[in-house]
Image (tube, rainbow, N blue to C red):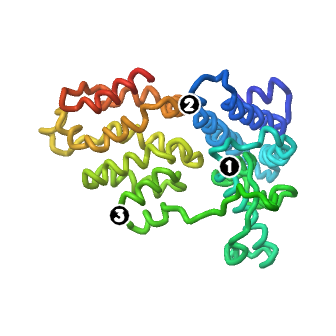
Amino acid sequence: MSKTAQAINEASWQETFKALWISALRLVQRAREPLEGPIPHLDTRLCMLLALIPLAIAAILKEETDACRAEGNKSLPRRLGLVSSLQDLVQYSGLLVPPSSLVNVANAAASKAAIFRANCKVVGGNPSMIGQSHSSTKAVGNMLHLIVEACISRNLIDTTAYLWPGYVVLPGHSKNTSLPQESPWVNFMQGAPLSDPLKNALIATPASSVAELDKLYHIALNGSEQEKSAAAKIVCGASLVRGWNIQEHVVRMVVKLLSPPLPSDSSLQGSMSHYLSQKSTLNAILLGVSYVDAVNIFSLYGMVPDVAASPSLMWRPDHNHLSRGNHLTTLRTRI
């Protein structure tokens, strides 16, 4: 669709990408308008801005890179257009104001750039020295910093974006800044047990890598009943709605968890005992994805048919599983 719009409008790639960013930023801003109804659907709109548009642009840039490699051409006008479109967004300060729930996240992204910039000045740009000084540097963030982080995470641009003129804004006496803190996922990957404090921290903090998701998926299938439930709740937490850099992987993982692999024992295949053995995981997943924004996110990724066809949603629970039945009814209705 982006390529078609670019051709019809006879626009440059800079103009095309800039139009995409501005349209999505306006969509996010609409979440503050009361005419949108009682539920703002902010997470759905952030998914469009920080996940789907970068994914679409990634496909466009990959096409260009493959063609240039085959032709031996080093010119990449689409990638240059992307960089220019991002730099042009600075002038749209009204659209870049982050929603209140994202102020700390935006400030953390800006502070990350400020630390990088400060270290580059101190150590002469030596990457091996980054992070060894100026760890307390703060900066004021906005939606541009989140967009740039989304692009960097998908290798659409590199960290030289942190050095763009005007990208880092120091806070002065502002009180609404927060420094990047160590992610609880570091402790999880180091083997810490899923205690309640760690579980709650992981639910509230998006995963940052596919490796973290893979470990969580293994626990959701093979852990103890308590670990299965905790892992499923974590998957359906911030990683699903705010893990924009790996959101497509989280969505696919949820669908896989709704359709657990069949047991090797042929006598159990086709029986409900297989799903009962995964009741902790399924119950937590069904509860976690039954709200409106989650269903909308699945829809944006084109995964609603996969969710609707999952065996878990076909099951009609008896009176011993009324809680799960309520979650099923809610999810079926919204799908």
**Circle 3 SS class:** loop
Q: Please name the amino acid that badge 1 sits on.
A: Val
Q: Please name the amino acid that badge 2 sits on.
A: Leu
**Marks 3/1: CA distance?**
31 Å
The answer to whether one can see residue 213 in this image is yes
Which residue is label 2 attached to?
300
202 to the left or right of 175: left
Which residue is label 1 attached to?
103
- In front of the other: label 1 or label 2? 1
> What is the x, y in percent for residue 113?
74, 61
**Marks 2/3: CA distance?**
34 Å
**Circle 1 SS class:** helix
User: What residue sits 75% from the left and 73% below the top?
Assistant: 119
Instruction: Give the vertical position of 258 relative to 83 (above or below).
Output: above
Q: Earlier in the sequence, mark 2 or mark 3?
A: 3
Q: Nearer the viewer, residue 205 or 303?
A: 205
- In front of the other: label 3 or label 1? 1
Q: Please name the amino acid that badge 3 sits on.
A: Pro
